[in-house]
Image: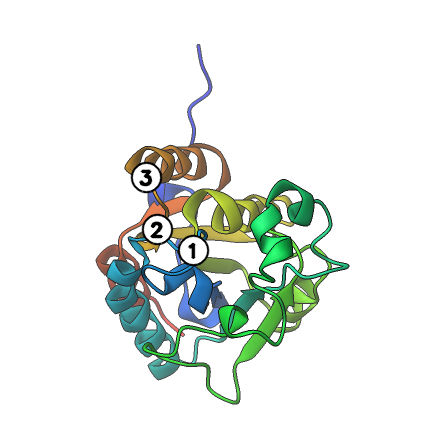
Amino acid sequence: MEPKNLYGRDFFALEKKSTVLLVVDMQNDFVEQGGSFTSFPKSIGIIPNIEKIISFARSNFIPVIWTLCDHGPPGGGLLLKKFPPIRDQKVLWLNTKSFELYPRMTQPLPSEYKIIKPKYDAFFGTNLESILKNLRTESLIIMGISTEVCCESTARSAFHRDFQVAFVSDATATRTDGAHNATLRAIDNYFGRVLTTEELLSELAESKR
């Protein structure tokens, strides 16, 4: 008999008091339409859901952490070899416009955390794990760009560190439905829970502080 995986609240239930929100790489070069080769056409469509979740988090004292990719040297490493335009056009390099958060959406509050990461995984080479532990985090909500790269890499890394991952299906985006849906299946089967924005907010609203 095959082992039965746990899904949904049978795996874990979200509680406001032990949950942190991670907004992944909503930067100009990923979000701005018709820009660099790294832009994601579907990124604009998830902004309303991202803003709805951020608003709920702020109203309910759920900490918010923002990540930004810095692909410049030396941290960019093999990314600069794999993607020559990133190297030659200085795409997503610190202190460039492409690196900055997309301005036509909610911006971080002074009290919120901003993490600059050199790789896809937001834990690699950053103090994210220390921040989460200091916040007594049990569950980490992940949303942003892109589904199967930075969001999935971070979700897997969070699971390996024993943080419960809530991955928001309609607040993450990438170029193709196939890649997006493949990640959702992998996360739900092996690394966490997949929820819509409404499912996430409803469950959090029901929880006790």
| Disc number lying in front (2 or 3) | 3
Residue 26 can be seen, yes or no:
no
Name the residue rendered at 61%, 70% in the picture: 115
Where does label 1 land, which residue?
145
**Secondary structure found at label 3:** loop
Mark closer to the chain start, 2 or 1? 1
In front of the other: 167 or 28: 28
Observer-nearest of 51 and 194: 51
Q: Position of residue 171 (x, y in %)?
A: 32, 57
Residue 160 vertical placement versus 44 (above, below): above
| Label at residue 176 | 3
Residue type, mark 2 in image = Ala
Q: Which residue is mark 2?
A: 173
Question: Residue drawn at (54%, 60%), measured in percent from left and top?
Answer: 138
Seen at 56% across and 63% down, the residue is: 92
Labels 2 & 1 near each other (Cβ < 8 A): yes
